[in-house]
């Protein structure tokens, strides 16, 4: 085996780990967003858990964050504006990623 082959395998393994971390961080961020929005909406217990699941499921409508944003914007109309929602999405993405790194 050559050094080039070793480097190629290491790069591929890193790419796969990074992709998995990003996927898991996105899913965790969506859960955290759902919990945040449920609190703003005054949902508790089972209602809150069900709402979190709808936010998580909304991410499967299309690639990217816009499907989750549209869901939250519609649900939080009059409660939180676009800037607040987008800022919270960014903040919780960082928190979710850090939580996963800390768990590893």
Image (spheres, rainbow, N blue to C red):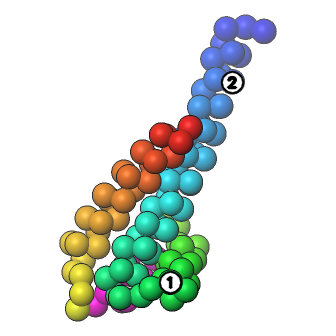
Name the quadrant containing residue 4: top right
The image shows residue 84 at horizontal and vertical percentages of 22, 72
Instruction: Name the residue furthest right.
Output: 1
Question: What's the mark number on residue 12?
Answer: none
With respect to residue 54, does 8 lie above or below? Answer: above
Q: Is residue 49 visible?
A: yes
Instruction: Name the residue furthest front.
Output: 45
Q: Is residue 49 left or right of residue 70?
A: right
Query: Disc 2 vs disc 1: which is toward the camera?
Result: 1
Residue at 65%, 31% (x, y): give it.
Answer: 13
Q: Are marks 2 and 1 in contact (CB under 8 Å)?
A: no
Residue nearest the observer in this picture, 102 or 81: 102
With respect to residue 95, does 16 lie above or below? Answer: above
> Which SS class for mark 2?
helix
Residue at 45%, 61% (x, y): give it.
Answer: 29
Q: Is residue 32 left or right of residue 84?
A: right
For label 2, the residue is 9
The image shows residue 91 at horizontal and vertical percentages of 31, 58
Question: What's the mark number on residue 45?
Answer: 1
Residue nearest the observer in this picture, 49 or 53: 49
Q: Which residues are magenta?
A: 67-77
């Amino acid at each position: 085996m050559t050094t080039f082959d070793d480097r190629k395998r290491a790069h591929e393994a890193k790419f796969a780990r990074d992709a998995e971390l990003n996927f898991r961080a996105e899913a965790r961020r969506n859960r955290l967003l759902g919990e945040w929005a449920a609190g703003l909406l005054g949902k508790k217990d089972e209602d809150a858990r069900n709402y979190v699941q709808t936010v998580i499921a909304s991410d499967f409508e299309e690639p990217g964050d816009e499907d989750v944003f549209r869901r939250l914007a519609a649900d939080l109309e009059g409660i939180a504006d676009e800037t607040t929602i987008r800022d919270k999405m960014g903040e919780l993405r960082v928190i979710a990623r850090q939580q996963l790194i800390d768990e590893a």
